Image (cartoon, rainbow, N blue to C red):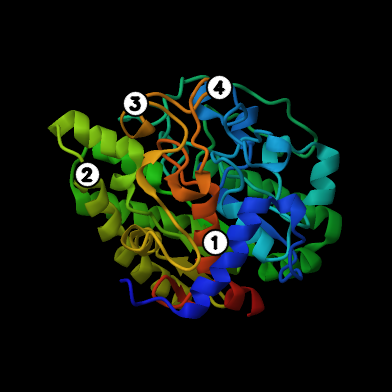
Amino acid sequence: MANRTSPYVLVALCLFVVLAASGAEATNPPQRLVPAVFVFGDSTVDVGNNNHLNVTAAARANYPQYGVDFHRSSPTGRFSNGLNTADLLAWGLGFRRSPPAYLSLTERTLRSQMHKGINFASGGSGFADTTGSRLVNSELLFVSLITERNSTNLSLYMQFGEVIPMSRQLEYFSGVVKFMTKQSGETKTASLLCKSIFIISAGSNDMFEYSAFPGDDYEFLSSLVAAYKHSITALYEMGARKFIVISIPPLGCIPSQRLRRLKQTGTQGCYDPLNDLSLRFYPMLDAMMQDLAHELPGMAYSLADAFAMVTFVFENPRTESWTFTELEAACCGAGPFGAAYPCDETAPVCANRDEYLFWDANHPTETVSAIAAQTMFDGNRTFVKPVNVRELAQL
């Protein structure tokens, strides 16, 4: 894969890597390309929804060491040392960072924010309503606690458990659309939504849990693709037309899964069963997206091949745009691969974070998120198709 990316992409990546290093507050975003951005998914794009859930600290990222490279070194609920992929994609689209977490909004702030976008993502969640409810090999332990948020006259807040599954994220968005329609009318609401960008980054947690209790791989992967199709179709029916879909990366190579292999087999390396699932998933998702675009008039999308992108970095740790000296261990954590003990207030943190692929046992560093975002934004068909994000926004 080393020869399949263009020099233009490598040069363009510098901008986002510099942005990540300097912080969003220090760099003005480019011209706004779309009216709003709406985000759905898991911890890869969560910007603080889990802060508002009654869960253990392991399911939140609103405490040190998280956010050490964010503005004023403040933890915000992002599972990163700084910005995440949603932030950096939003910046490329003309916003300072990702729209705010849905659960952080009051009725007043919701009214002003909904026309610019909202982030519904929840760390630990998946397409299955049960995903995130149990400990799965070094993944987060979520205690089954149910809490009820005081409802408003908008009926936007509903009961939720320890994480917000995709079905609940869609319900929240449906409530927002109804409120927008009430405030602005059907025509203006439909016009805004059809021009806006919808980001979906999910499925990894479903895959983690399946790998702990495996069955028929093809049946599982087919059901995951069907869940993607259901969610995209539901958003389309509510007015969405432009989608950024981020596929599943080589999960077996993250620190927690390297530790899993070490404990199970006594050998080092990636956890192959998970990588095999991730690799098989992408072409199935690709085929479904192509079919769906033919079924739904006006639908357009950018599908990012996260497996190919991460593999490219593994095979090319040093380029004109980045230098990674650590591809296996987490920057924040302790024990083998930095994954045996969590990235909490007492965990050691590496000084050269821009040279680490992984921030904690399960998530990339801000620099990696910047590389991913710029590849999606301006990349060639090796990594994102049928159009990249810039082209999608201009349709």
Mark 1 in CB contact with mark 2 (< 8 angstroms): no
User: Whole-Å distance between the Cαs marked 3 and 4?
Assistant: 16 Å
The residue sitting at 30% across, 67% down in the picture is 283
- Tell me which amino acid carries mark 3: Gly
- Tell me which amino acid carries mark 4: Glu
Query: Helix, strand, or loop for circle 2?
Result: loop
Viewer-proximal residue among 8 and 140: 8
- Tell me which amino acid carries mark 2: Gly
Sequence-first disc among 3 and 1 = 3
User: Whole-Å distance between the Cαs marked 1 and 2?
Assistant: 27 Å
Q: Is residue 213 visible?
A: no
Question: Disc 1 vs disc 2: which is toward the camera?
Answer: 2
**Label 1: how many Cα within 10 Å (few below 14, some 14–19, many 20+):** many
Q: Which residue is mark 4?
A: 345
Mark 2 in CB contact with mark 4 (< 8 angstroms): no
**Label 2: how many Cα within 10 Å (few below 14, some 14–19, many 20+):** some
Q: Which residue is mark 2?
A: 269
Q: Which residue is mark 3?
A: 335
Sequence-first disc among 3 and 4 = 3
- Tell me which amino acid carries mark 1: Ala
Assign the N terminus to one quadrant of the image: bottom left
